[in-house]
Image (cartoon, grey):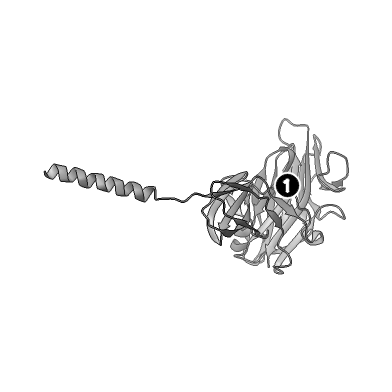
Amino acid sequence: MKLHLLLIAASLFLFTTCNIINPSEGIPTYIQIDSVQLKSTVPGTHGSVSHKITDVWVYYNREILGGFQLPARVPVLANGKGQLQILAGVWDNGLSGTRARYPFINVDTFTFNANPTQTITHIPQFTYRTADTPSIKYFIENFEQGNGFIKRSGDTAIVKTNIPGEVFEDDWSGKIELFDTITTSENISVQEYMLPPNKDCYMELNYKSDIPFVVRLQIYHVGTFIYSDVIGLNAKDKWNKIYINLTGFATSFQYGKFKIIIKSSLPAGKTSGKILLDNFKMIYFN
């Protein structure tokens, strides 16, 4: 009898546990997001709208549903009319393991009527945050008017190019070209940045390269110049976009003065190398 009772109790426990693990669920409406668009609102302020938005972070009526890699099929348990809030997601420092909500792009909102089991297609329309957030600072170097970098050391500098095949968009890009007798290049931004601590700060860059190069910081902090590598970038035979997170550096060196350095050298065994740059962009909360 005791064994019988124990078996009944065990069965009830397992049944209850299964219900806890697999609770009764409703039928979702699916939102299909295959791609996104980044649109221009104030080109003179935020520059190019080239992007590498890889993910979306989705909220339903301001409650988070999760982060989704594009293309995404988002299940939403809903009744009647509701609203999605969709945030742009990028790879911090170009790493797929560090997916982050990008703080400088406005939220896309999408109102829909729930239709369980049905799929609704939506293309989020993103814009850079500008008018709603006057405390955001932008610095743009797209090489169209000038060149915001000068040679710091090495054999050659970043120069402007308008050669077809070397320009990402518009009329000009930046170029570093190395040969067997011109093997090193280190260029520093003319612009100096005061980056407040504990606030988001990113550097955006489009690049194409057949040799690796390094992004560094020159930091003037407490009366001393400090040099720190931020990220090493491998060769890319097609134009790539990267979002480099500088928030930690701004917080570690509070109220330091920052300049950006692009450093490269000709790898052993190569007789030439070329690095193409465009749409260098610093964005940070002031």
- Identify the amino acid type marked 1: Lys
Residue 192 visible? The answer is: no
> Where residue 217 sits: x, y (%)?
68, 55
Compared with 155, 130 (above or below) is below
Count of marks, rendered view: 1
Which residue is at 75% across, 31% downward? 270
Q: Which residue is mark 1?
A: 263
Q: Specify the quadrant of the image occupied by residue 126.
A: bottom right
- Of residue 264 and residue 197, the one placed in the foreground of this image is 197
Sort mark 1 into few (<14), some (14-19) or many (20+) by Cα contacts within 10 Å.
many
Q: As drawn, is 12 to the left or to the right of 157?
A: left
Residue 232 visible? The answer is: yes
- Of residue 200 and residue 114, the one placed in the foreground of this image is 114
> Where residue 117 sits: x, y (%)?
54, 46
> Where residue 38 sits: x, y (%)?
73, 53
| View extreme (bottom): residue | 134
- Of residue 194 and residue 267, the one placed in the foreground of this image is 194
Quarter of the image with the N terminus is: top left
Which residue is at 85% across, 48% downward? 170
| View extreme (left): residue | 1
> Where residue 223 sits: x, y (%)?
67, 66
SS of the residue at dot 1? strand
